Image (cartoon, rainbow, N blue to C red):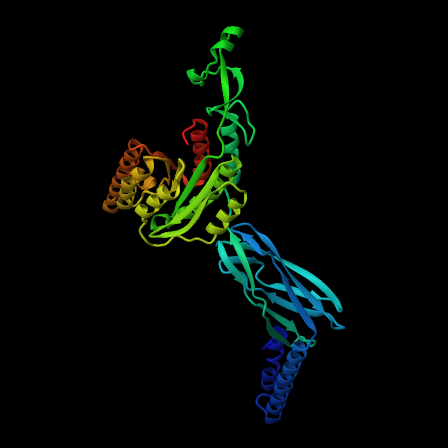
Amino acid sequence: MIIPTRRMMWLAATPLVAILISRGDPAGVGAAWALAGLLLAAMIVDGLVARRLPIRLTRRAPDQLHVDQPDSVSLTVENRANAPVRLLLSDRPPEGSRAIPAVLAVQAPPRSRTAHDYELIPTRRGPTAFGDLDYRVLGPMGLAWAQKRLPARHEVRCMPRFANARAAELAERRALLRQAGSHRFRWRGTGTSFESLREYSTQDDIRWVDWKATARLNRPISRNFEVERHQQVMILVDSSRALTTFCGSRTKFDAMLEAAVLLTRTALGQGDDLGLMVFADQIDLYLHPRREQTQLNAVVEGLYARQPRLVEPNFELALTLAAKRTSRRTLCILLTDVTVIEAARRMLLYSKVLTQRHRFLVVTIADETLEENELREPRDAEELYRVGVAAGLMQERTVLLEELRRSGVEVLDSRADQVASRAIERYLDLKRRNML
């Protein structure tokens, strides 16, 4: 495609000027038409010459991106001509990504190879791809652009951004430092294997006191026990419609996905077997509990492209399958939401299948919108109705969570930006108290 330049647009006005100056004289009109023909021919020739210029373009982009994290994409221009060439480069970034700047104006010296970078900020996780590369080459006379397209499709993966990874790591360290030791894989708590003696603390259980050492040293002495390893943890991730609502700039499912990955990293670091189940109206993914570090990669691969679906969660199928597939006593961590009260009631009913043999922890995200509407002072009938509905839903939610606790289920209700770190703290606390 040949596109006129701004210079050509200005020159195209000269035949009109000639007609105005000649005041419509036939000779002047004829000269204007001749000038217009010459300009048109020159533009076409300039565009054809531009199309034949020996220009080669290549793109160098990473195979893996991360949501909301800028990355650099390089476009290499190889000019084999003996004269400088001006180009406009416009890439087709993955869907949902922003290119800064969107268009690159490039001056390629003669006989050169130059690299030109732009910043790419993806906003959607999952498999995606770069499209073809569009570019324009300016002709030698500056009258026309030759627009061309280079087939350059490039498949990439956009991984989720673990915005709270640092907070989760700090939470894990705090949980370990609350014990007498802070070793990553072998920390002190209330396990079954004797590890060492230490000074008695007011937070210690009376059963930890070593009475012989206390009598010998004439001061209270407690035993340290090594927390058990090789226990089993199963993470169940709800991907139904309840997780499609937004909390800030991301969905609740994205927050739960982050919590699942960071929990996996912590559990494997503590030497436990870790399994994963993703479900909605059916089981979408099942990974049997394993202790190898490769399990973390399997969890990330299984979750990074998942999206919640507008269906009801099948808690009966998920909880029953989790109970059947895990023969050993297991800590089952369910990452879900209880905004949809009817579905949450079914979860309460089938939670008894797990609590008979396993430890069951339900992690939910507090609905900030409901909390804000409940505390709002109504000024008209519509706001009064909104406040009443929010108060009713919050009351039902509170009652449901309390019923879960009374039935023997551990419950963690947290804000979206804290759910990963608080879930890790609760897991380590249950492990320390030998409740797995």
The residue nearer to you, when weighing 303 against 116, is 303
From this view, report whether residue 181 is shown above or below residue 76.
above
Q: Can residue 317 be seen at all in this image of the molecule? A: yes
Residue extending farthest to the bottom is 26
Q: Position of residue 211 (x, y in %)?
A: 47, 10
Q: Between 399 and 32, which is closer to the camera in this rendering?
A: 399
Image mark count: 0
Looking at the picture, tell me which residue is in the foreground, 110 or 272: 272
Residue farthest along the front direction in this orientation: 327
Residue 308 percent across, percent down from the top left: 39, 52
Please state the horizontal and vertical placement of residue 116, each as a whole percent of the image.
66, 60
Q: Residue at x 54, y 42 (%)?
A: 293
**Image-quadrant location for residue 1:** bottom right
Place of residue 190 in the rendered image (x, y in percent of width and height, measured from the top left): 46, 24
Say above or below: 353 vs 282.
above
Q: Is residue 377 visible?
A: no
- Relative placement, left or right, of 201 versus 37 is left
Residue at 64 percent across and 81 percent down: it is 43
Q: Is residue 350 above or below residue 61?
A: above
Please give left or right for residue 376 compared with residue 184 in the image.
left
On screen, 21 above or below 74? below
Q: Quadrant of the C terminus?
A: top left
Along the viewing direction, whichever of 355 and 6 lies nearer the viewer: 355
